[in-house]
Amino acid sequence: MDKTQSPSLGGLILTMGALIVALVYIFVAFNTEDPLWFYTKFDEQPVEIFLNCYGNEVLIVPGDPQYGGLVALVNKTLSGRKNWDSLTMSNATYQEYLTSPDMMVMELYYSPQVRIHSFYRYFSNLDSLVIPLVGRHAQTNAVFGRSNNQNTAGSLHYNGIPDIRAYIENEGICTTP
């Protein structure tokens, strides 16, 4: 008695589904050069945080009272869903962010370099993240990346950026003049 089974439709559908999922994963992983592109959590510790507070420099380092709360809020904001667009920070805008008396801008410095896992390859090997809180591009909730003193292409946008500004103001780190 021959006990060979005939192919089943359910087995075919299951095999095709698994194949499609694997191909999508491989395609995105190669495109982004990130095998963890699907991992949404950001949990990095900057070596320092520079804040241009309306023309005044504020430096926050590990051990400062505000460091832990600010880093936790930034990491919470950068975790989860990410929206990328082509809005790119120019070198002139970056220089203005560093010194303008009309802006509040935070730059977080990382060593070693970090990656924000996403469908987009542009946010890998970053030395710093630039977050405008008041002034140019602040209303777009943008986060810009920098790598090796160069701006990366595009920006990521997050709904939690106003919470970071509120924390900075409520903690007295920087207040509107």
Image (cartoon, grey):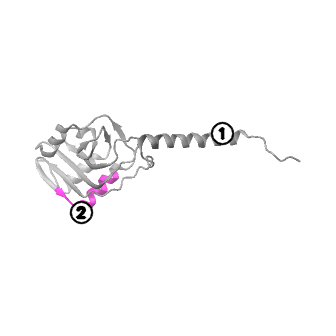
User: Crowding at label 2, few (<14), some or many (≥20) Cα neighbours within 10 Å?
Assistant: some
Quarter of the image where one finds residue 152:
top left
The magenta-colored residue range is 59-76
Residue lying at the far right in this picture: please name it: 1
- The answer to whether residue 61 shows anywhere in this view is yes
Please tell me the numbered disc located at residue 62.
Answer: 2
Instruction: Name the residue: 24% across, 62% down.
Output: 62
Q: Nearer the viewer, residue 81 or 91?
A: 91
Amino acid type, callout 1:
Ile
Give the left or right position of residue 94, taking residue 14 as reference.
left
In-front residue for pair 162/70: 70
Q: Is residue 82 within the magenta segment?
A: no
**Quadrant hosting residue 145:** top left
SS at mark 1 in the image: helix
Q: Amino acid at mark 2?
A: Pro
Q: Is residue 61 above or below residue 83?
A: below
User: Residue 172, can we see it?
Assistant: no
Crowdedness of circle 1 by 10 Å Cα count: few (<14), some, many (20+)? Answer: few
Residue 46 x/y as whole percent: 27, 56
The residue where tag 1 is placed is 13
Classify residue 70 by image quadrant: bottom left
Question: Which residue: 15% across, 49% down?
Answer: 52
Residue at mark 2 to residue at mark 1: CA–CA distance: 53 Å
